Image (cartoon, rainbow, N blue to C red):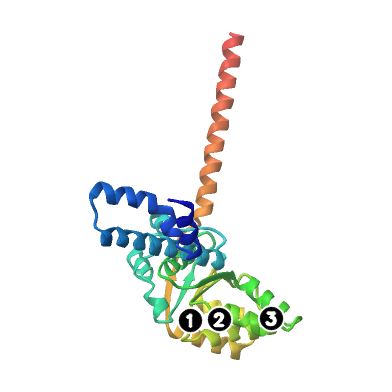
Amino acid sequence: MNDMLISRLKSLKLSGIVKTLDLRNEEAIKNNLSYMEFFELLINDEVLNRQNNSNKNRIRKAKFPQHKTLEEYRFNYQPTVNKRFVYNLATCEFVRKKENIALIGPPGTGKTHLAIALGLKAISQGYKVLFTTVNEMLEELYMSRADNSFRQKLRYYTSPDLLILDELGLKKLNQNSVDDFYEIISRRYEKGSIIITSNKVFEEWARIFYDPVLATAILDRFIHHCHFIVIKGESYRMKQREGVIKSGLSTLFKTLFCRTLTFYILQG
């Protein structure tokens, strides 16, 4: 490519074509492609490049704490999780229908992993996603009242197609927090999807909220269109830790045994 052509492609923001033009030109010459076939390849490259850039941008804005895919989730460690049901949710039909998901289970069972994985699937289909913990969101809303940016913060949490709220029930909520939580749930009701993860069984959710009236209003709206995934397995993190401890102890015993054996051999 000459500098003038590169400059014009960049000015038209056709970076996908800039990246592949030399390769496609060689391919067209080698395979004797028509002008239209060559042009179609370039356009497809540009579209794919824009999709990839858009996905990367949405992933950045989603603020995931980690990159966790559905393919990485170890269903064999959690046999109570219906793999087919989870993969059906991964089609993101629930996002299109403005439905919710509740992921409930003990710590370390992969609730956050599944929430992030479903969020990534939604992003791959062009949806806007935002990840936050419940406490972080409520703190942000509380602090926003001091600088009169509360309405702006509300829009921030209500505008994404999918809002992921992690760790509901980690702390008991006060009256102000419950008021703000209700605002988010009510504004998103039948307008946007929510995924909530919690280590509290659903029967205990009402106790998390300070006000029983608001608790009823919140739960009524959230569960109206909701899919539940209840995980009853053991903590994967604890299993990993136990494996490390056992491996460490085994290595220690082997080392001590070898040293003792060597000592007696030298003494003999």
For this view, does 261 lie left or right of residue 101? right
Q: What element carries label 3?
A: loop
**Amino acid beneath label 2:** Thr
Instruction: Provide residue 229's location: percent of width, then percent of height.
Output: 43, 70
Q: Is mark 1 on a helix, strand or loop?
A: loop
Task: Say whether residue 80 is visible.
Answer: no
Q: How far apart, in angstroms, are the residues tagged by discs 2 and 3?
A: 21 Å
Mark 3 or 1, closer to the camera = 1
Residue at x 54%, y 32% (from the top left corner):
251
Q: Nearer the viewer, residue 214 or 11?
A: 11
Instruction: Provide residue 90's location: percent of width, then percent of height.
Output: 38, 68
Q: Tag 2: Cα neighbours inside 10 Å, few (<14), some, or many (≥20)?
A: many
**Amino acid beneath label 1:** Gly
In the picture, the disc for residue 14 is none
Question: Which residue is labeled 3 in the image?
Answer: 174
Q: Nearer the viewer, residue 27 or 264?
A: 27
Instruction: Provide residue 100's location: percent of width, then percent of height.
Output: 45, 78
Residue at x 56%, y 37% (from the top left corner):
248
Task: Quadrant for residue 123, please give it.
Answer: bottom left
Query: Nearer the N terminus, badge 2 or badge 3?
Result: 2
Query: Contact (CB < 8 A) between labels 2 and 1?
Result: yes
Residue at x 51%, y 78% (from the top left corner):
203
Query: Nearer the N terminus, badge 2 or badge 1?
Result: 2
Q: Which residue in the rendered view is the most extreme toward the right?
A: 146
Question: Which residue is labeled 2 in the image?
Answer: 158
Q: How far apart, in angstroms, are the residues tagged by discs 3 and 1?
A: 25 Å
Q: How far apart, in angstroms, are the residues tagged by discs 2 and 1?
A: 7 Å
How many numbered callouts? Answer: 3
Question: Which residue is labeled 1 in the image?
Answer: 192
Q: Nearer the viewer, residue 36 or 65?
A: 36
Residue at x 52%, y 38% (from the top left corner):
247
